[in-house]
Amino acid sequence: MNMKAPRGTVDILPGEAKKWQFVENKIKHVCDRFHFEEIRTPMFEHTELFQRGVGDSTDIVQKEMYTFEDRGGRSLTLRPEGTASVTRAFVENKLYGDPSQPVKLYYFGQMFRYERPQKGRMRQLNQFGVEVLGSADPAVDAEVIDLAMSCYQEMGLKSLKLVINSLGDKESRTNHREALVEHFKPHKEELCADCQLRLTQNPLRILDCKKDRDHPAMKTAPSVLEYLNEESRDYFDQVKNYLDSMGISYEIDPNLVRGLDYYNHTAFEIMSEAKGFGAITTLAGGGRYNGLVEELGGPATPGIGFGMGLERFLMALEAENVDFSIDEKLDCYLVAVGEKAEKEAVRLVHELRKNGVQTDKDYQDRKMKAQFKAADRYKAKYVLILGEDELENQVITVKEMETGKQEELPLNRLIDTLKEKLPGGREE
RNA sequence: GCGGUCGUGGCGAAGUGGUUAACGCACCGGAUUGUGGCUCCGGCAUACGUGGGUUCGAUCCCCACCGGUCGCCCCA
């Protein structure tokens, strides 16, 4: 039997999980301040949702989906990203009818993509994401970008680069698409195999190709920005103005087209520029998708959102040596000596916990000295010693580890005393 | 999917075609009859990724596979 976790998956062990909790809580606070609310959608969906939502011509749909058939013969797919699911939930639950518009949502969750794993790329990955549905105000684009940047900045990341672009509205996109096909058609044979296919399926993505980057036709290719109609250009200008007014700096990259079909108008990516970060630098990516809700059977509703890779977030924190040491001390460690004391200790630990005192004890039948070592390892603030003597006199010895001072207390006064010594308690 | 590189106890890390595979850390016990550190002593463990092949004999040589890692494509 293969006892290893499947390829491209990892266990997040307690030490690491603490960091995750910290980052996740930070992000939740940011969302709260931006007045976004959480949504939780299923981890798998009908395969068709992603085919239509994400787009048949995308790499995700063509080669990265975990698709399977259930016992009822339905084709299901582990979600490769969050937007399609959230949009589906928006339509299915008729959130477009909710008086609170736009609907501002965030989610955390595992995503799944069948790819060759490498640093910052897992087959099961964790994403945080945001979707705003129901507003076509360019201020929302800025708000969403602001939110993403805030998450990073408040964790202390500095080496960030925000790249934006506009793909324009439907009309702009169509015109640009035609121009691209015209432009590249004569060079079809010189392009890489992928791009030859893209020429008919999704010509926009030729601009993004790394292989053909140096092809002469690439430099003279019609830029998306040149093909924006007046309305689209105006929209993009407004987004930029809002970002300027917020003091958020960005770079415009006309070749930023994003891999997913549903985007229009604003597209953006946030990258890490930290040294030693690795080959993959994209931390988050997103954009506007004004046609998606309709595509999935809802009323015409504008939308915008992003996905943020949490593995990469943690990597960036590491790369920038952000110190968020989580110093967790244990309130109490109970050291019991002798069989009778051991029995009483179990009851006492229960009692302490009931009263809100975080407590642990030894379960390895260790000697007293070793129990103290354990208490030290757990950074216990107090060690409670219960031995034959104490038991006989109905007292307990309380030792403060930092100072080394200790005192004897009547057993019935223990809890009140500890509550005094440990202000605040551990309430959620 | 393609290419490079790696795979020895819980962790780190030597090593060899041939009797018991070093060492360090960690852990447990003792010196110290009920007190954290240091020191000394002792103990500890289903360790050579898996499966084949070459060989009298393979952890070591060959092949395949699996996995990690780095890069390509693409993306979070």
Image (cartoon, rainbow, N blue to C red):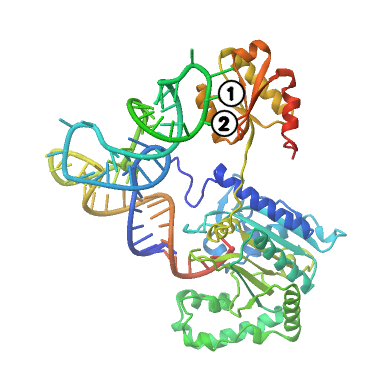
- The earlier-in-sequence mark between 1 and 2 is 1
Q: Is residue A32 above or below residue B25?
A: below
Residue furthest top as drawn: A392
Q: Residue A97, position in %: x, y?
A: 85, 60
Residue A127 marker? none
Viewer-side residue, B14 vs A2: B14
Name the amino acid, label 2: Ala
> Residue shown at 45%/43% (left/top)?
A4
Residue A375 marker? 2
Contact flag, marks 1 and 2 (Cβ < 8 Å): yes
Q: Is any atom of residue A330 visible in this view? A: yes
Q: Residue A145, position in %: x, y?
A: 70, 68
Q: Quadrant of residue A268?
A: bottom right
> Residue shown at 60%/15% (left/top)?
A341
Q: CA distance from mark 1 to mark 2?
A: 9 Å
- Secondary structure beneath dot 2 equals helix
Q: Residue A257, position in %: x, y?
A: 60, 75
Q: Residue A43, position in %: x, y?
A: 64, 50
Crowd tier of the residue under label 1, counting other residues whose Cα lies within 10 Å: few below 14, some 14–19, many 20 or above: many
| Disc 1: host chain | A
Q: Is any atom of residue A73 visible in this view? A: no
> Residue shown at 61%/13% (left/top)?
A389
> Residue shown at 67%/65% (left/top)?
A149
Residue A335 marker? 1
Q: Quadrant of residue A238?
A: bottom right
